[in-house]
Image (tube, grey):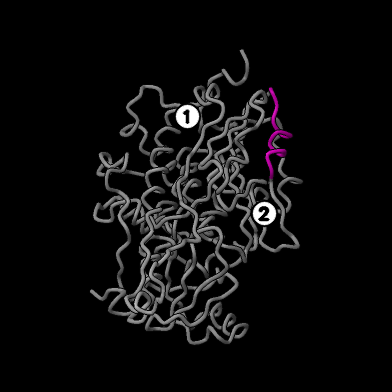
């Protein structure tokens, strides 16, 4: 199992903690997609990006773009909402908020 | 007997159900906000709400490229899993009931019917934020709901956005009931893998199949509401499955998730500490503390709406 730390060797530790804590979400960019080609034409800086990181809180300014090794390439002042993604090529753990949750005793019965 | 004391079912065939997100196509999180609403749409479908009674108001440009954005992922729990999320939306909501956010006030007409209005998206103390372009920014405020409400019908607002207190002080004499996710506070959406246990098969199924894409975050109030509505028999011990009890469980869950997520880890490298010349190292945080206090307005009405 390849973890985010194995793959994104140069990711900022604070950003990693914030991804694991749901403040941000990370997606792998489908580089051959038209949406990414169009974005790269508009913003040359994102051309080398492999991952996009989007914020999950209100007062954020834009998306972050990372290189294949996790290095921050570009901090955008816009949100690239419509990039096509492909499955992540690593796993990462998120914070567990289910411990002592009010519904914890019924979790095994969850049906929808 | 006044309207607020008459008993009605939350899911029925005569009420209008409006799903609303004002986040603009280029704003912060339009796809995750639509994913929030999709989860509730599933409940409408499951509970046989007629398609002519369901409305979706959003920046309609979001739908133009939704299939590409979700990489044509199909939704497993509708029509044998043959349709994409976008196709499910267009199969379950009439095209004329999909209303652009800028036209909602002008076009939507409840025509005397009861109304259940469920909001995702962003909120400020002025109300539900609409659009992201400063030149075209507006809000749907509490004035609107007072204007369209009366003694003749019921209006139930379920507001999951930040600063839901914008709707905490509506005129309850007009039969308005509000379930708000927060008072004067901000919120954050969370990864479903944090809110459920991915090692439990049914949780994994839900996470993998209800999300537009991997790791997209969901509003914790919306998810908690979904959980309570869909698990009411096993979860709610009370005989009365009415909105007061629905709210109690939803609020407890939301507060629990948010209080845990507020414990943010701050990483400081050894080098940063060594580089400091001062004797005292001061940490300051720009972020707000994320404690979200949900509220319920108009308990008389809530006690008479059953699930």
Q: Is residue B58 left or right of residue A71?
A: right
Q: Residue at x 51, y 31 (%)?
A: B10
B150 in magenta: yes
Q: Quadrant of the N terminus of chain B?
A: top right
Q: Is residue B193 left or right of residue B108?
A: left
Which quadrant holds residue B209? bottom left
- For disc 1, the chain is B
Q: Quadrant of the C terminus of chain B?
A: top left
SS for tag 1? helix
Image mark for residue B130: 2
Q: Relative to residue B37, is residue B14 depicted above or below?
A: above
Discs 2 and 1 lie in a common subunit: yes
For the residues bearing labels 2 and 1, Cβ distance under 8 angstroms: no
Q: Relative to residue B113, is residue B214 depicted above or below?
A: below
B232 in magenta: no
Write down the region rendered in magenta.
B141-151
Q: Relative to residue B142, is residue B290 depicted above or below?
A: below
Label 1, residues with CA under 10 Å away: few <14, some 14-19, many ≥20:
many
User: Mark 1 sits on what residue?
Assistant: B243
Q: Residue at x 63, y 26 (%)?
A: B172
Q: Main secondary structure of the magenta part?
A: helix
**Where's residue B61, x and y in %?**
64, 63
Q: Residue at x 48, y 66 (%)?
A: B70
Q: Residue at x 52, y 66 (%)?
A: B67
Q: CA distance from mark 2 to mark 1?
A: 28 Å
**Where's residue B239, x and y in %?**
36, 22
């Amino acid at each position: 199992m390849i973890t985010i730390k194995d793959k994104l060797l140069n990711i900022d530790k604070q950003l990693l903690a914030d991804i694991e804590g749901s403040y941000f979400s990370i997606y792998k960019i489908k580089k051959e997609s038209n949406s990414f080609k169009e974005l790269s034409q508009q913003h040359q800086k994102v051309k080398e990006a492999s991952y996009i990181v989007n914020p999950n809180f209100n007062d954020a300014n834009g998306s972050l773009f990372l290189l294949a090794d996790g290095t921050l390439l570009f901090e955008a002042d816009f949100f690239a909402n419509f990039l096509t993604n492909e499955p992540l090529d690593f796993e990462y753990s998120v914070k567990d908020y289910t411990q002592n949750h009010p519904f914890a005793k019924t979790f095994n019965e969850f049906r929808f | 007997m006044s309207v607020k004391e008459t008993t009605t079912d939350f899911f029925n065939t005569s009420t209008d159900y409006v799903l609303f997100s004002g986040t603009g196509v280029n704003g912060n999180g339009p796809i995750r906000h639509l994913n929030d609403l999709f989860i509730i749409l599933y409940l409408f479908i499951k509970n046989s709400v007629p398609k002519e009674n369901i409305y979706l108001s959003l920046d309609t440009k979001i739908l133009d490229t939704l299939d590409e954005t979700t990489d044509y992922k199909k939704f497993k729990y509708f029509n044998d899993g043959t349709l994409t999320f976008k196709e499910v939306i267009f199969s379950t909501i009439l095209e004329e009931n999909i209303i652009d956010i800028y036209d909602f006030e002008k076009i939507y007409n409840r025509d005397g019917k009861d109304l259940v209005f469920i909001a995702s998206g962003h909120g400020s103390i002025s109300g539900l934020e609409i659009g992201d372009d400063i030149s075209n920014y507006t809000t749907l405020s509490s004035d609107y709901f007072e204007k369209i409400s009366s003694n003749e019908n019921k209006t139930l607002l379920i507001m999951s956005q930040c600063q839901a207190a914008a709707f905490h002080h509506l005129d309850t004499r007009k039969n308005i009931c509000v379930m708000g996710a927060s008072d004067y506070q901000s919120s954050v959406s969370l990864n479903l893998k944090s809110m459920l246990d991915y090692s439990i098969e049914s949780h994994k199924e839900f996470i993998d199949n209800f999300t537009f894409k991997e790791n997209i975050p969901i509003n914790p109030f919306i998810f908690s509401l979904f959980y309570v509505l869909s698990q009411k028999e096993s979860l709610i011990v009370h005989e009365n499955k009415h909105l007061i009890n629905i709210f109690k469980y939803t609020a407890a869950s939301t507060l629990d998730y948010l209080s845990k997520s507020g414990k943010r880890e701050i990483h400081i490298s050894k080098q940063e500490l060594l580089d400091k010349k001062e004797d005292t190292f001061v940490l300051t945080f720009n972020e707000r503390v994320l404690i979200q206090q949900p509220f319920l307005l108009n308990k008389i009405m809530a006690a008479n709406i059953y699930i």
